[in-house]
């Protein structure tokens, strides 16, 4: 499937974004950062350290809670990305926003899609990020790489998705956000005849 940043921007511009307006949740934003390598798009993920406050040791997107000085979710995602991996906001082309997501730790997360024209050169915050995990987008598009487990939360069954890339387990909100975004994008591209055979 030949996805490029132009398709993603158009897809995000022409859909109605689902938002969560529950003020009891902490507002947060993450950056789904895409970049080209080997004639395809890759996604940048981070492995969190064991000393961060939330989601210790998990694979996640750069991002975090909104500060009072952040004008919007984009500002939050770009600020947090710079703090965590040293990437200058001016090097990132923002493509748009995807649907808000709720996570059990009490956050409502807004995913911001971003793109860099070359693989990003990063500088890790040793307190927050243990390592960078780069994964080709095609890996998440292949349903054979996906598995689902059912958990019970508040008496209701929920599906939790998992991807194992090399030695890294990608699950929870990170896996769910990527899966939802790519599923909708793929369906939209099919409708417009943009998916490769």
Image: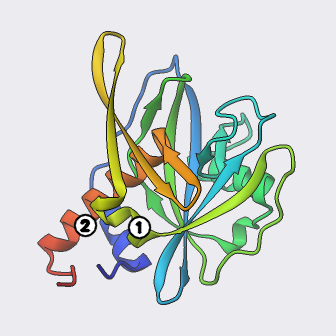
Q: Which residue is mark 1?
A: 139
26 relative to 116, above or below: above
* x and y, in percent, of residue 38 in the image: 52, 88
Name of the residue lying farthest toward the front: 167
The x, y position of residue 157, in whole percent, is 27, 21
- In the shown orientation, is residue 156 left or right of residue 101? left
Q: Is residue 46 left or right of residue 15?
A: right
- Tell me residue 153's x, y (percent): 37, 16
Q: Which residue does the image show at 73% across and 52% down from the upper left?
A: 79
Q: What residue is at 54 percent from the left and 22 percent from the top?
A: 106
Image position of 54 with respect to 79: above or below: above
Disc 1 and disc 2 in contact, CB within 8 angstroms: no
Colour scheme:
rainbow
Residue at left offset 47%, top offset 77%: 41
- Tag shown at residue 157: none
Which one is in front, 52 or 65? 52
Q: Is residue 117 visible?
A: yes
Residue annotated with mark 2: 186
Label 1 SS: helix
- 32, 158: nearer the viewer: 158
Look at the picture and state if 99 lies above or below 154. Answer: below
First reached walking from the N terminus: tag 1 or tag 2: 1
Can you tell which of label 1 and label 2 is closer to the viewer? 1
Is residue 146 shown left or right of residue 58?
left
197 and 95: which one is in front? 197
Question: Looking at the figure, which quarter contains the C terminus?
Answer: bottom left
Local crowd at mark 1 within 10 Å, few (<14), some, or many (≥20)? some
């Amino acid at each position: 499937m030949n996805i490029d940043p132009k398709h993603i921007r158009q897809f995000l511009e022409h859909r109605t974004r689902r938002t969560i307006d529950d003020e009891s949740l902490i507002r947060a934003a993450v950056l789904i950062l895409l970049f080209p390598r080997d004639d395809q798009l890759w996604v940048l993920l981070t492995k969190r350290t064991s000393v961060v406050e939330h989601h210790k040791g998990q694979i996640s997107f750069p991002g975090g809670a909104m500060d009072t000085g952040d004008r919007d979710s984009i500002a939050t995602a770009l600020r947090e990305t710079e703090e965590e991996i040293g990437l200058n906001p001016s090097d990132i082309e923002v493509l748009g926003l995807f649907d808000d997501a709720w996570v059990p730790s009490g956050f409502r997360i807004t995913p911001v899609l971003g793109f860099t024209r070359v693989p990003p050169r990063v500088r890790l915050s040793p307190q927050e990020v243990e390592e960078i995990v780069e994964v080709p987008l095609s890996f998440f598009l292949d349903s054979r790489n996906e598995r689902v487990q059912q958990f019970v939360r508040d008496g209701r069954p929920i599906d939790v998705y998992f991807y194992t890339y090399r030695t890294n387990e990608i699950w929870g909100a990170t896996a769910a956000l990527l899966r939802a975004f790519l599923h909708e994008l793929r369906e939209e591209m099919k409708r417009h005849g943009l998916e490769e055979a």
